[in-house]
Each structure stands twice: as C-alpha cells, then as structure tokens.
Image (tube, coloured by chain):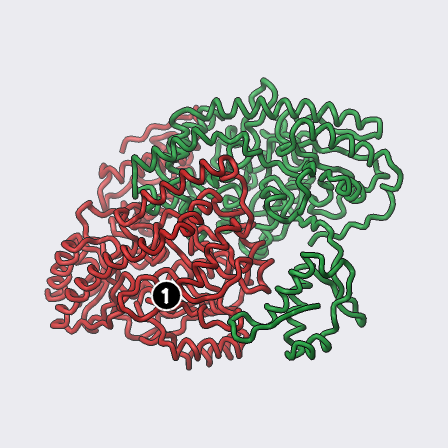
Chain colours: A red, B green
Amino acid sequence: MDIKLDKNINTPLYIQIYTQIKNLIENNHLKEGEKLPSIRSLAKKLKVNNITIVNAYKILEEEDLVYSKEGSGTYVSTKSIPLNLPYIENESIDLMTSGILTLSKNSINFASVSPIPELFPIEEFKQVLIEVLDRDKGKAFVYPEINGYTPLRESISIFLKKNYTTDVDKNQIQIISGGQQGIDIVAKTLIQPGDYVFLEDPTYSGAVAAFKSRGANIIGIPILENGIDLNTLEKYINKYHPKFLYIMPNYQSPTTYSYSEEKKEKLLNIAYKNNLYIIEDDFLSDLNYTDHEKLPLKAMDRQDQVIYIKSFSKIFMPGIRIGFLTVPCILLKDITKAKHLTDISSSGFIQRAFDLYLRRDLWKSHIEHIISVYNKKYNLIVNEAKKLQKHNVTFSEPKGGLSLWLKLPKDINTFELYEECTKNNVIIVPGEIFYIDNNNKNKNYIRISFGTVNEEQIVDGFRVINNCIGRNGINGNAKFIPFI
Amino acid sequence: MDIKLDKNINTPLYIQIYTQIKNLIENNHLKEGEKLPSIRSLAKKLKVNNITIVNAYKILEEEDLVYSKEGSGTYVSTKSIPLNLPYIENESIDLMTSGILTLSKNSINFASVSPIPELFPIEEFKQVLIEVLDRDKGKAFVYPEINGYTPLRESISIFLKKNYTTDVDKNQIQIISGGQQGIDIVAKTLIQPGDYVFLEDPTYSGAVAAFKSRGANIIGIPILENGIDLNTLEKYINKYHPKFLYIMPNYQSPTTYSYSEEKKEKLLNIAYKNNLYIIEDDFLSDLNYTDHEKLPLKAMDRQDQVIYIKSFSKIFMPGIRIGFLTVPCILLKDITKAKHLTDISSSGFIQRAFDLYLRRDLWKSHIEHIISVYNKKYNLIVNEAKKLQKHNVTFSEPKGGLSLWLKLPKDINTFELYEECTKNNVIIVPGEIFYIDNNNKNKNYIRISFGTVNEEQIVDGFRVINNCIGRNGINGNAKFIPFI
C-alpha cells in the first residue's frame, strides 16, 4: 500500500492517510475483503503516531469503506449498495446523480419518482427567467420577503382556487424551497423534544428523519387502501396526545393508496375534535389518470387545521426548489420565524420567474402534457405488473401517481429479490424500508416507480423481475445489509 | 366597526373577523389606542359564539395589532417599529422589503448591511444563466448532488486557494442555500437539546435563534477589539464543555472588530487542545479597505477543526442564495444527512451558473468594483462619525466591512436615541439588541451600517444623529418596547 505524507501542507496527516486509502479502495487497488496493514505497522512505516492511523481508519469505517473484526484487523468492505433509509423516497434526489447508488448507465431504475429532464418546460421557463431579469434587473436578486414574493403568493392563491377549489388567502401562504423544507419548517415550529407525532405507516422516510432530528417520538398508524386506520388513530390520540399527523392523502408514498372522500371527512372531524393539526404533503395529486377530480384534503378543511405542503418537484421540475405551505393564522408568526432561521428566504429570482410562469397560464398545458406521458407509462406498467399475478403478486391500481405497490407472496424475500434484480441491472425498492413499526405485519411489498424509466425499459425491467421471482433461491436467507 | 361574515365559505368565522379588523387597523379606520367592542357585544352583533371573538382577538394580539388591559378591554396597539431581535442582523433580509420595518421611502436606513441592486453584476450573471440553460437544458433542473454540483465544488476549492490561500478538497465542501442555512445545518449536526454552545457577545442574532431552536444553552464570551476574550473562553470551556464556538473573525457583527493574528493562533491552539469545533462565519472578509491581506481563520487551521461558512449575500447578491461550508472529514456523513433533511439540495441551476461565473474569472473585477464603491462610502462615514467626538462618541476604525460600532457616553439612552432618529426618518440600531448576556457591561453602542445608504444620505443622516445626540431629553426614560 503506497501512501505518501506531506508534512508541509495544512491537511492533517490522518486526513491525508484517509484520503489516499479511500482512493485506493475506490480505484480497486485495494480489493473487497482485503486486509489493511495493522495500525502499529502502518504507523511505523509512515513515521506517525498510532493515533493518527486510528483516526484515519475510524473515518474509513464511518464511511463504510472498511470494517474491523475484533482481534483480527481492518478489512475493505464489500461494495453493497447502501439502501439508506433517507435516500429512497418520493422527494429524493435522483439516486443515480446523487452517487448514493452507483448504477451502470444502462440500469433500469424503478426506484426513482423523479421526472426526466425531457419533460421540463425549459424553453418557456427560460423565457420567463430572461423576462424577469430584463424587467426587475438587480431587484431580482435582493432579499425577498421572508414569507415569499407577494405577487407569487397571489398567483398561488389563485392557483389553489382554480385547480383545487381551495380558498387560501395570500397572507396565509409561505413560500418554501421545496417540500422537504416545508416539513423541516413545520417540525421546527411545532415539535419540542419528546413530543409525539403521528405518520402513516409505511411513509416517507425524509419526514421521519426531519421529525426525529427535532427529538420527536415517531408513531406509525397503519394505512389501509382507503386511507389511514381511524380506529388506531383515535386510540393512539388518546394515548399519546400527538402534536400533529403527517399524511399524504392522494397517491400516498410508498403505498400509492388514496383516501376515500368518506375517510377524509371522518379524519377532519377527528382532527377538529382533538385539536390536532394535519400536515398534508401533496406532491402528486395532479397526476390523476381518471376523469374524477382529485382534490387535496385542504379543500375540505373548514377550520384552518390542515397545513398543506405543496411540492412542485415531481409535477414541474425538481430543480425549481420552490413550493409553498398554507399557514394557520395562529401559526403565522412562528412559521415566519422558523423560515427565517432556516434560510432567510427562498430565491427571489426563481419566485419571480415562477410567478410569471403561473400568470402566463403556462401551467395548464404543461400539466396536461406530463399527465398524458405518464398515463401512457402507467397503463403499460399496470399491464406488465398484471403478468406477475401468476406468481401470486397482487396490487391495487392507484390510477394516478408514479408508482405501483406490489404485494408479494410471503415466501419471497424482497431483499433477496432486490439483490437478484440489481445483479441484472434492474433497481426495485423493498417495501420494508418505508416502515416505521418493525412489528407491522404484511410487509412483503416492493415499490416500482416509473418516473425515470422509458417504455422499453418498463417491458425489459418487468421481464427481469418476472424471471427473478420465478427462479428458485429467492426465499433463502437475505444477505441484505440493514440500513441505518 | 363594520364586519361582514360569510357563513358559506370555507374560511372560519374567527379568521374572517380577524382579517377584517386587521384591515381596519392597517387602513387607519381603527386608530391607535382605540378600544375594540367587548367580546360579548361583538359576538351578539355578529351572531356568533363568544369563543369565536376570543379567537379572533387572540390572533390580533399575537400579531401585536391589539393589546388587552386586564378588566378593561382590548385596544389598538401603538404602531411602534418592532425591533425584533431576529430581524436586525448581518444576514437579515432588507428591513424595508421585509415589511418588518415600514419606513417611508425617503428614510435613511443605517440598519441594513445589504448591498444595493445597482452593485449586482446582473448582465454578466444573466449571460451565464442563459449559457447554462443552452448548454444543460433540462439537466439544469434535475436534483443536484446533496453536497452540491461537483464542478462548483471544484471551482470553490480553487477560489479558496486563490483568494484565501486555503486548502480544502472539493469533497469537503458542502453547498448551502446561504449562510443562515449553513448555521442551521451545523446546528442540526452538532447540537442535542441541553448542549452548550459558545458565541461572541454581542453577536449575530440569527445564529442565536438557530441554536436555541435546537435546544442549546447559549453562552456569550465577551469580544474585545482584538478578538474574543481567551481567558473567559478557557475558563468557560472547563465549566461548560461546549459543542462548538461560533465566531466571525473578520469585521465581526455587530462590533466590526477583527481578530489579531496572534489571537487567532492562540484560539486555534485552545480549540485543538480541547477538541472544540470552531464555526467561522465569513460574510465580509473580502471587503478589506487596506493593502494588508485579510485571511479567514480557516486558512490557519491545521487540524480540520474549523467549519468555515461562507456567504455570498453581502459580497455578491443576497438573492443568489448559494454559499458553502467546509466539512471536517469525520462529519461528512452527518452534514450530508442534515442537508438532505433540510431541503434535499440547493438549486442546481444557480449552482451551475455560479460555477460558470467563477470559472470565467468574473469574480475579481466584481469584487474590486464593490470594494472601491464601499471604500468611498467607508471613508465618508468614518469622517462623519469623527464629528461626533465632540459628544464623546468613540469608535475604532474597522478598515473593512459595512458598519461602524459607535460607543456613546453612558448618559445617552440608545433606545431613546433610536426613537428620536426614527422620528426624523433615520434608522440606527441600538447595540443592546445584539447582546446575549444582559448583565454585560458597557453596552452603550449603536451600529451604523452603510450597505444601502448613498453618500448624500450618509451626510444627511449623520446631521440628524448629531442633532439628536446634542439635544436634551435623550437621556430620559426609554419608551422602547422590548423585543422578544
């Protein structure tokens, strides 16, 4: 192992050692399973203290590049794809570009709900960007209002009325830098360490992470095909007195389930009776492949108790990093404060451009276009998934959104299936990683998303899944390395 | 008082009442000090429950629009400018555009350190924005890497080397959506409820707010003209075992003090000895009006223990909402996780444009231009401030940055001075609001910033300050309404 130290530069020695070993591993000069030199021998060779080597190995271990065996030494880790909970989810960055998953270029990625760049209305958006620069000049880059650029809040108020028959005053709209920030800001506003918060189970891991980071106790309420289990909800409200309930009423992630109208009404009444805030995360409502209206829960809220978080990442472009949330009057001050200490304000330039985009009424043709593209993919993928019924794979048709939630027979180990598919360049997501409660039954699901894949890939990908399920050996012992 | 309720719309009745009373107050139909109808009488008149009126009045009170006198009733508040701690500070949004301060258009605003739009390199930036769109098309709007667009991290690594002789590998750079987000992410990564963190006293209130929001105990260490008081620091380290020390080594806000080289060296040694992280917030180092180099503390850090947060808001454009922080290797994973749960990633579009801007070497001429503009204003303001010496006002010349920190004689009440100046359309900032420790002595300062004012305003503004200090009555009882 060839390591050169430079004692004349600022970089600490342990960092120099760490970096060089990391490079050796990444470039395969150190192979999987290979043993690293002992701490003492490497320290001697490099003429440094033992502690310097200890520190370098510690970071390598923290990054899962190596692991240590008690009494034996340090070894290069096996390159497993780290199915890290926070990174596979609806609002996730594209797994491939993130480097979290290193997929070969021709992988078929059923893990991503991100739209493909070809669907972005780049030309139209470029026009409004340029127009804003010409119109506002330097003003486009001053600090905007903390709660957001006023004309955009107006546009969004109109947007809500027109598209979702939802009345929200512009002064109750807070602009956010994407849906995840909305979750973070709500967490900052409402959660004190030790508080209980409720989520659907399974759910979006990015919300779980944000709430946990504030010291919340996380309670999962099972979600059924027509929405959250209200009996459990009521029982748990009395037991835990939660700060809020976080839900995705339309095309829930990962289950793809939508709440029935009846359940929505009952849920609101429970919330009103118990003085419970509902955080509604809406990132997909618009992708509706039926003729029936699909409204947010917020549209039915009579008592200003639903905090509606809207992300445009999936239905417009992830890179816009602009969304909004609706703020109950009583929380206006606290939400503004939380937004201010989070990032002062969201990009005024992009806010101005998005405002113009909405005012120009460019939204309608855009959303119609992407619905027609996704609808086609949806029909194809439902068709392909039905072919798995011969293996006793079942699912309910969401008729919207970007995923299917396939229930597998109990004798199929979804992590093994995931590994088998990965070997064949097809990436699926084992459902188990979305669950809060490890004791929850009936977890034998996989999530198949079609945000990124094209039609040819859908067909090819399902052929692989079909083969892998049909093959022997899937129901053996999982070799999956548990996520953190 | 004319209020109309519509029971057929979704907006709750108490919100309808709140909104209409708010409008009446804002449009001066309800005057300052005027008594609102009693709860019972208004409820009767509007045919609603008493509790509906109670709720409406509660929100009005929360927003400081009204106040209640025990046993007497509810009254319209006096319109004081809420000198709210989180809103007057270095990274603050422009106070005027924020609506926090409602200044008349011809106010002379010595409270803002924000640059004026005329200084923004809009034409150059527009060119790189368009170039990015033409070059990358839809890719400009996909999710970028959580830690930031790789070419930008490279450009910044080069930028650090070239401008600050500071070596930081691109893999140790985390792109952030402005300096405040850097503070929030560090807080998320390092603070558990109950932890102690140290800050200079006085300091930036946005940092205090972010740390408090994570449940930290805040300890202020007095700052002297050559940097933080090391004796107190060492004593307190042993007593409190803090998670980190947050400082602004160059042109500290609000004091404008810079650390001496000797003090920097000593401070680093204390940090190394005690395993203490130093969070260096740098938003002004570049605005140096001397020929002597002004390097960040990070440039001297040999043990990867300074977390350097760089904001471009003051030296480029606030609206860019892009900055970076340097990450100790051992924290890489945790910082990435914290960034992910904060907002997934910063705008890839703006990151790509800023990368091109740096690569085109447009930075140098921009920074030289703004230094020359600010230097001129600086010389003028120092000259004007010296005229206050006849009133025993003293200050040390920072020779950089965007503010002066004027020490007033003890018999002048800075809050009264603030009110007097405000009446004359000149906005200054009483130094006391920046202090953590209320028992701290020698607080008789005001901060005068010249980010926004022009030369004529500087002269006119100082004439007002001069008159107000010279006048009788400033040293009476303060009528200032304390901030929260």
Farthest residue in the top direction?
B291
Up/down of B271 relative to B181, above or below: above
Dot 1 alpha-carbon crowd within 10 angstroms: few under 14, some 14 to 19, many 20 or more = many
Q: Inspect this view and state whether residue A13 appears.
A: no
- Tell me, yes or no, if residue A312 can be seen here: yes
For mark 1, give the secondary structure.
Answer: loop
Residue A178, position as x, y percentages in the image: 42, 53
Q: What is the total number of numbered labels drawn onto the structure image?
A: 1
Chain letter for mark 1: A
Q: Residue at x 32, y 40 (%)?
A: A38
Q: Quadrant of the N terminus of chain A?
A: top left
Write the residue at 74% across / 48% down.
B438
At a point 67% along the width and 50% down the height, the residue shown is B84
Q: For this rendering, which residue is in front, B58 or A25?
A: B58
For residue B136, side relative to residue A273 (left or right): left
Find residue A230 and report its horizontal and vertical position in percent: 41, 79
Give x and y (percent) for residue A104: 20, 46
Relative placement, left or right, of A348 versus B112 is left
What is the quadrant of residue A294 in the picture? bottom left
Which residue is drawn at the image coordinates 66% and 59% (left, top)? B63
**Would residue A117 be found to the left or right of residue A44 on screen?**
left
Q: Position of residue B224 (x, y in %)?
A: 70, 33
Q: Quadrant of the C terminus of chain A?
A: bottom left
Q: Nearer the viewer, residue B19 or A471?
A: B19
Q: Quadrant of residue A24?
A: top left
Amino acid type of the residue tagged 1 in the rendering: Thr
Residue at which label 1 appears: A203
Instruction: Name above or below for residue B223 compared with residue A92.
Output: above
